Structure formats: structure tokens, C-alpha cells
Image (tube, rainbow, N blue to C red):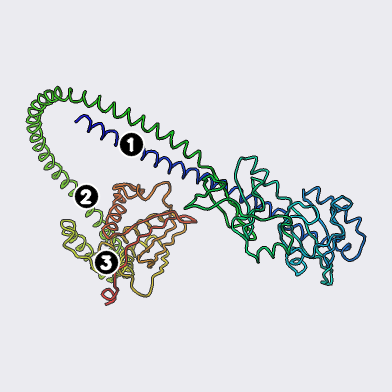
Amino acid sequence: MTVARTIVFSLLFLGFASGAFVLSSRYFRSEEVIRAEGRLSLYRSTVVAELDRFSHLTFVLARDPFVMETAAGGPTAPLDGRLASFASQSGLDAIYLMDFEGLTISASNAGSARSFVGQNYSFRPYFQDALAGGTGRFYGIGATTGLPGYFIAESVVSDLGEALGVIAIKIDLTRLENSWREGGEQVVLTNADGVVLLASNPDWRYRTLTPLDAGQRAAIAEARQFPGQALDPLDWREGPGDSAVIGGMEVIHLASSDLPHGWQLHYFASVDPVATRSWLATVIAVMIAGGVALVFLMRRNAQTQAALTALEREEAELRRAYDLLAVEIDDRRAAERRLERTRDELARASRLAALGQLAASVTHELGQPITAMRNHLAAAEMGGSERAIPSLAGLVERMEGITRQLKFFANPGEDALKPVDLVQAMREALKLVAPNLDTHAVELVQDLPDGPVVVQGNALRIEQVMVNILRNAIDAMEDGDRRELTVRVGSAGGLAWFAVADRGHGLGQSSLLELQEPFVTSRESGQGMGLGLAISAGIVKEHHGVMTARNRDGGGAVFRVEIPLAETTEEAAE
């Protein structure tokens, strides 16, 4: 039994160590790949920047008056000095001017041992491309100096459009190799044929990633791109995924193809750090696992011994818990009885509060028609006219309607909501406050639509809101010099609305919420109880609407009520 357990334990140990090594290798390799991607992106940016740094210089030089004059047959000495100054300041290898046959007539290195003057470069592709009207670009080994470089050329054209020659520059890119080598990196830049142009390892330069065919070799020879180079294949092969073998060593291989001229930048990263870190992580994981296993065994023995003691202690605590639970059940039953009594008391208090609010509401609402009747009677006594009788009859009907609201307050659900035309409701409300308008000499401005604006609601309740707002507006202008009342009704965006604007004292520092509080009023004692806006706000809320208020420009206030439009307007129109 002991031998079998030892074998099982050994197999588990080996499996854990192997799994830890595999997982850590994958993790550290992914980290190396991410780092390599960052380095590759950095080196790609430097290559592109180096190629683009002087991309516009030939365009400028081709239009330089000195260049054009020399190309047209002028003296070359002044231009030689000028080009030498430009090359020195910009760090270029050379700047030179060729005539339309490819013969160099002026150069920044004129007079030196490796001067381009007198050399013919018509065989170069960059000269041919530039002479054809484009921008010539080419990388190769210099035919005169034997040093590699990147050539950019542009044609020189006279003011009459005649081709006079080609201006070219040579850029030394070997500084990129130096930076790669100093950073300890393995980087290779290849052209579209797979020929290594630049490499951190000098032995890799002018090798090929893939064998060249006869056509490729012929084109290279014709352009004299790599004279004297065998262009042998590089000792490397691509592996699966992001792996490769170069010089017999496995490496991480990443490549970037989005470079000019179909070039590719290859980055090789060693896998040695991955293996080293993976072994270190595996050893640490095994040590931690062994320590955890040891601690687990020790704790398991201690827990087994403590379990017996805890079991006896838990049994005693369970007995005490049973006793406490019985006491708690009795306490909860007593609390439930107290809660039931409290609920009954709250219900009675709620009914008393509702009764008080109802009494205040009815008292306030009856005050409006009573005041209107008093005004009509006074007008009738002074005028001796019976024309006030129909108005009095309407007010009596209004008072009856208010008393019928007692049933609505008792059970609001009994009165079903019906289509109500806000235009007609506003006209009825204006009739009720007409005596007030006359008494205070208020100018009424109406902006009512020709057609109905229909909502679902209770007509009497909506008129009640309108009358409250209208009377508040009239009262606000009682002591004012400008008494103008503007009434508007309309609809927009699925909402019906009406607005009342006055030229009174405005809201002052009070907010609409403060003015809606019951018994809050700015009128003199005996002139109102401050319930109008509180009642109106409740009615608007019952109709799923919103009431807002703001101070009006030039003095006064604007009250606006919005209520959702009814689905159809046919019933109200009938």
C-alpha cells in the first residue's frame, strides 16, 4: 500500500511539474512575443521615418533656380558648393545633378576622390523613373563609391516644360544597422525580392530569404543593384506560428510587411529567456506546492483533533440556541400584536387627515363661485339688469358640481376619465373669472387653436385647475399698473398644454414647490387660504400631468400645465 501511494504521489508530482513548465513557457513566450511586437513596431517606424525624412527634398531642389540654371547649361562650380553645403547640413551622403542623358554634371562631392561628376547613371531605375516624370526611388550599392544607399530622384524641368536633367540624393541607411547592433537586437530589412538590405549581423547582408530565380537575378544585374555579391540564401527556415530557426538556433520570428517598395522588416528574438524563466517558475511552483501540501497535512491533523472538541461545544451551543429560539418566538408574537394595533391607529389617523384636507378643499372651491355670485349680484344691483341671472345659474351649477366632487373624493375610481377639450375647458374657466377681469380692468389676450386639444380626464377638475391659476394671476396684478393676462392652449410631442401669463409681482424668491404647500399664500389675511396651487397640483398629478412656473421677462409669472394627449379627438369633437 505504501509503495502504491508513493508511485501515485510521484506521478502527480511529475504531472504538476510538467504542467507548470508548459503553462509558464506559454505565458513567458507570449510576453516575449508582445515585447518583440513592440520592438518591431518601433524599428518599422524608424525605417519609415528615415525613408520619408528627405522625400520632399528632391522636389524642392528640382525647382531651385541654381539647379535649373546649371541644368540648362550654366556654370557648375556655384552649384557644387551649394549642393555640398546642403549635404553637410542635412547629413546626406551626396546630392548630384545629371543631364537628361544620365551624365553627372554637378555634385556635392565634386573634387573628391569618389566624385560623381562625369559618371553616367542612366542605367539606374531611379534615373529612368524620374526622367519619365515620376519620383525615382531605389536601394543599391553605389556604382562609384561601392557603399550602399537609398536614392531618391526628381526631374528638373524648365519654365517651358522641357526636361533639363535629374536631381538625385543618396541617403546612408547603415546607421539603422548600427543602432540595431548596439541594442543587441537581431533585425533584418529585405526588399521585395527577399534580398537582405540591412541586418544587425553583417554576415547576413546581401543574403536572400528565398532563392532567386533567373528573372530576378537578371533584373538585379541590369540595374547593377548589388555588384559583386553572390546573393546566397540565408541559413534559416520558418517554423510553425511565430517560430523560426536561424543559424541552427530556434528564435521567435515576427515580420512587418507594410513598408514602402514591398520591403519587409524581420525581427528575431531569442527563446533562451523563455526557457530560463519557465524553469525558474516551475521550481518555484513545485516548492510552493510542496509547502502547501505539507501545511495542508499538518492542518488536517490539527483540524481532526479539534473537530471532536468543537463537536461537543457545538452540541452545548445548540441546546442553548433552542432555548433562545423559544423566547424569541414569544417576543415576535407579542411584537406582531403591537404592530397590528399600530396599523389600526395609523389607519384612523389617515382617515382624519383626509377628512381635514377634504373640508379645506371644499371650503376653498366653494369660495370661488360664491365670490363670483357676489360680483354678479353687485353688478345686477347697480345696473338693475336681469342679464346676470344666466351667469348666476351657471355658478349654482358650478357649486353643485363641486359638492358632487365629495363622491369623487370618497371613491375617485367611480368617475371614469373622459375626453376633455382643453380649449372648451379654458373658455368655461374664463367665463367664471369674467367678473374678476372686469372688476380689476384686466386686458385679456387669448391664443386658442381653432380645433380641439383633447386629453383624457375630468372636465370639472381640469376647469378647477384653470380657474385657480387664472384667479391667482388676476389677484397678482391687483396693485399693478400694467394688467395684461395672456392665455394660450396648444399641443406638441404627444402633450397637450395650457399656459397663463400675467404682469404681476411674479414668483419672487419662492419656488413652485413652496407655493404648492397648503396654506402658503401671499394674499392678505381673509383673501384666501393658500390651497389653490396645492389642490391644482394634486389634480394635475391625477391626470398624469406636470405643472411648472417661472418668472416672466419684463415682470410677472407664467404657469404652464402639460397633460398627455388622448388617443383620438373624435369623441370630444362630437
The one of 219 and 513 positioned closer to us in this rendering: 219
Q: Nearer the viewer, mark 3 or mark 2?
A: 3
Sequence-wise first label, 1 or 2: 1
Q: Secondary structure at mark 1?
A: helix
Please name the residue shown 11% across and 23% down the image. Answer: 312
Q: Nearer the viewer, mark 1 or mark 2?
A: 1
Identify the residue position indicated by label 1 in the image: 14
Q: Are marks 3 and 2 in contact (CB under 8 Å)?
A: no
The one of 528 and 113 positioned closer to us in this rendering: 113
| Real-space CA distance between mark 3 and mark 2, rounded to the nearest whole angstrom | 25 Å
Residue type, mark 1 in image: Leu
Sequence-wise first label, 1 or 3: 1
Q: Secondary structure at mark 3?
A: strand
**Circle 1: is it few (<14), some (14-19), or many (20+) Cα within 10 Å?**
few
**Circle 3: is it few (<14), some (14-19), or many (20+) Cα within 10 Å?**
many
Residue type, mark 2 in image: Gln
Position of 41 compared to 17: left or right? right
| Real-space CA distance between mark 1 and mark 2, rounded to the nearest whole angstrom | 85 Å
The one of 470 and 347 positioned closer to us in this rendering: 347
Residue type, mark 3 in image: Gln
Position of 477 compared to 407: left or right? right
